[in-house]
Image (spheres, rainbow, N blue to C red):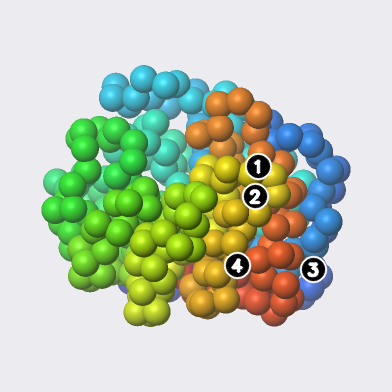
Amino acid sequence: MSAHINSFSRRGVLAGMLACSTSAWAAGVEQAVPHSIGSAPPKLDVPAGACDCHHHIYDGRFPVSPHWRQGFPPGSTVADYRLLQRRLGTTRSVVVQPSTYGIDNRCLVDALSQLGSFTRGVAVVATDVQDAELRTLNDAGVRAIRVNFVSPQTWGTTTPEMLTTLAKRIHPLGWHVQILMTGEQIATHEAVIRALPTKVVIDHLGRIPQPDGIRHPAFAAVRRMLDGGRTWVKVTEPYEDSKLGPPYADSSEVARAYVQAAPQRILWGTDWPHPTQRGTKPDDALLVDLLADWAPDEKTRRRILVENPAELFGF
């Protein structure tokens, strides 16, 4: 298993070196993309090897979990996602298993196979997952599990005890745990999260409620975890808790504060196809351009888009 990880990492390093040798920066192009308003590329060119660290793939070839009653966004396949990469100029990505498929990771594994060595995966598993399944997922390119406290799951309501058990199960693989909680849940369960044996990634800015923002107890909890050195934050989905709308000045205040506190443990992503947005979808080019505000320094943006994902996911 470790030999496979090293082999996978070597391929990623060689691919990254090749990408960087051809161009230091990558510009997007005009491209219409399903589930993304507008078609213009970002104003901000991204570094070669830039990674979208949070997106989903939905494919009608794979059955939706019986627990899921909301369907899924059509037009969210690997082919559709490649249009988004073309528009934004990104080349690497992290596919996150949506709750739609429960603990059936077949769509995720298929997407990883199509996207190849430039992509890693975040799976969803139950506490009784077999070691053989974990090894299979690892070989496919999975490097983490997602534990969702916000939406209904295959097993029902997620508990802190389940989070602890799952972290212990995947710790021998060197994976991390990606946690989706509301801000209030993070403040309540901070001690549990800090006690996990794995690295931790906090989803979607920690879902800090607005208008309180950086004054909310959840922000202080996430900051304490960032300061501890084993927690990472995804500056994704700024639209979800914003009360102001684009360009999300309230959520941007939270994102800037995280970047200033620990730029070496910040990850960026689109959350395409934006499954929580039932009406008008966000402009993914704007989500790239927000980085010019959140991380004005070019070196910091390169760290967030290239170096941090490479370190955490083994590109």
Identify residue for label 2. Answer: 248
Q: Can residue 102 be seen in the rendering of this structure? A: yes
Q: Position of residue 179 (x, y in %)?
A: 35, 54
- Mark 2, secondary structure of its residue: loop
Identify residue for label 3. Answer: 25
Query: Compared with residue 268, is residue 58 higher up or lower down, i.e. above or below?
Result: above
Q: Can residue 193 be seen in the rendering of this structure? A: no
Q: Amino acid at mark 1?
A: Gly
Q: Residue at x 21, y 33 (%)?
A: 156
Are dots 4 and 2 in contact, CB under 8 Å? no
Among numbered discs 4 and 2, the one appearing first in the sequence? 2
- Mark 1, secondary structure of its residue: loop
Q: Quadrant of the N terminus?
A: bottom left
- Mark 4, secondary structure of its residue: helix
Identify residue for label 1. Answer: 245
Query: Compared with residue 302, is residue 81 higher up or lower down, i.e. above or below?
Result: above
Q: CA distance from mark 3 to mark 4?
A: 23 Å
Among numbered discs 1 and 3, the one appearing first in the sequence? 3
Query: Compared with residue 173, is residue 303 higher up or lower down, i.e. above or below?
Result: below
Query: Compared with residue 220, is residue 154 higher up or lower down, i.e. above or below?
Result: above
Q: CA distance from mark 4 to mark 2?
A: 12 Å
- Around disc 2, counting alpha carbons within 10 Å, would you say few (fewer than 14), some (14 to 19), or many (20 or more)? some
Are dots 1 and 2 in contact, CB under 8 Å? yes
Q: Position of residue 15 (x, y in %)?
A: 64, 68
Identify residue for label 4. Answer: 256
Q: Amino acid at mark 3?
A: Trp
